[in-house]
Amino acid sequence: MTKYFYTALIALLGTVTISAQQFDINADLRARFENRNGYGTLKPDTEKAASFISQRTRLVFDYSFKNIKLRVSPQNVKTWGDVATNSKTDANSALHEAYGEIKMNEKLSFKLGRQEINYDDARIFGNVDWTMQARSHDAFLLKFNPNTKNQIHFGMALNANKETNFYENYAIPQYKSLQYLWYHADFDKLNLSVLALNNGMPYLVGTEEKVDYNQTLGSRLVFKNAVLSIDGAAYLQTGKIADNSVNAAYFSANINYKATTNFNTSVGFEVLSGKDQNDTSTDTKSFNPWYGTNHKFNGYMDYFYVGNHMNTVGLTDVYVNIGYEKNKFSAKLTPHYFASAASIYSAGEKQENYLGTELDITVGYKMYDNVTFDAGFSQMFATSSMEVLKAGNKNAGNNWAFISIKIDPNLFSKKVETKL
């Protein structure tokens, strides 16, 4: 009898499953000093350089249990001195992320809520982590992974300014709705991504809100081995914005070579289409990188596509990277050659397309696993054509410098196993 009892008990214990709840808290504190002396635009003779310190303080709470993942990430973004030392309030706080993700089976899951959207090299979708506030979307994301080599994502969002009982006209300063489909495949040393994005942009006709839709369609291909990587991308934009037809394009290519264990070099170019300044048509011919991490591209002084240079003459950017890494130290030198993709005119006379050369120098030092120092200096050598686009004085110095520290430790991590 005892024998049968122990046999039954062992069989019962064998059916017991153990589920693990995981709870993590991570911090992200960064402070950055900047001296802006012609950053983002040429410096006018009447202006002086600006110096300030900005700071991000972010906490990331992650929880997972069985098929559920939750993330809540509050943050405070400020400039030192923008809140009085005895202030009772601080309006600089917000939720950067607040989403839930449900795994329905091994291949299918969905995520909804405030979330970062990042794809490929972050040219069209990126989290813009260089800015203290970064970027996140209120969105729904459906993810399908048929196997380990293929991914398909479908995302959508619908924006409104507030909750209402009846439709109201609000020309909100961002998209009204968007839908996108992203496919990614890995083929040994090759990987391929395809993106189709549909943007619904609002505008007002009198007091009536209308929404026009424009599309971004394109692909990115990457080849990579131990020492060499080559990538290229092409996107087309069509549809309408504010009842004007859209016809724009983007092309890029990069070759990266790891010369030694410590040195790597790369050369590349980007072309973002633009519109001739003497073109009187209402068509939109300037490519828009929409929600990309634009600080990553076209020079660290952010003269192009960082809240500026939209719907203008476009850009051709040819650049070289020379990087060095050893132990905890890194350094990078990047010269950029900038030219307009379309023609520039001043007083009816066509100007040269060459806009200028920017030189970026950055260094980094990883003091500890969770403490990193970075510093950089950039100089813009602008031309008269840049003055036509940006005003200001091309001979006013036009440089930028920064020093930053990032502290991002794990504050708490707990795994609790539950028998079911």
Image (spheres, rainbow, N blue to C red):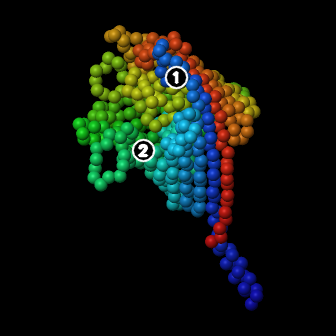
Q: Amino acid at mark 2?
A: Tyr
Residue 271 visible to the viewer: no
Question: Which quarter of the figure is the N terminus placed in?
Answer: bottom right
In the rendered image, residue 339, in percent from the top left (x then y), is placed at: 47, 18
Q: Which residue is mark 2?
A: 180
Residue 236 visible to the viewer: yes
Q: In the current view of this chain or complex, which residue is farthest to the front?
A: 86
The answer to which image quadrant residue 249 occupies is top left
Against 364, residue 1 (above or below) is below
In the rendered image, residue 276, in percent from the top left (x then y), is placed at: 35, 19
How far apart marks 2 and 1 lie (CA) works out to: 33 Å
Against 266, residue 23 (above or below) is below
Q: Is residue 207 left or right of residue 304?
A: left
In the rendered image, residue 45, in percent from the top left (x then y), is placed at: 48, 13
Q: Residue at x 63, y 65 (%)?
A: 19
Q: Is residue 389 left or right of residue 402?
A: left
Q: Residue at x 39, y 15 (%)?
A: 344
Against 9, residue 319 (above or below) is above
Q: Is residue 392 left or right of residue 170?
A: right
Q: Residue at x 63, y 32 (%)?
A: 404
Question: Which quarter of the figure is the C terminus placed in?
Answer: bottom right
In the rendered image, residue 24, in percent from the top left (x then y), is placed at: 63, 53
Q: Amino acid at mark 1?
A: Tyr
- Secondary structure of the residue carrying numbered label 1: loop
Q: Which residue is mark 1?
A: 39
User: Are there few (<14), some (14-19), or many (20+) residues within 10 Å of tag 2?
Assistant: some
Q: Are marks 2 and 1 in contact (CB under 8 Å)?
A: no
Lower sequence index among marks 2 and 1:
1
- Single out the mark in the foreground, 2 or 1: 1
Residue 10, label in figure: none
User: Are there few (<14), some (14-19), or many (20+) residues within 10 Å of tag 1?
Assistant: many
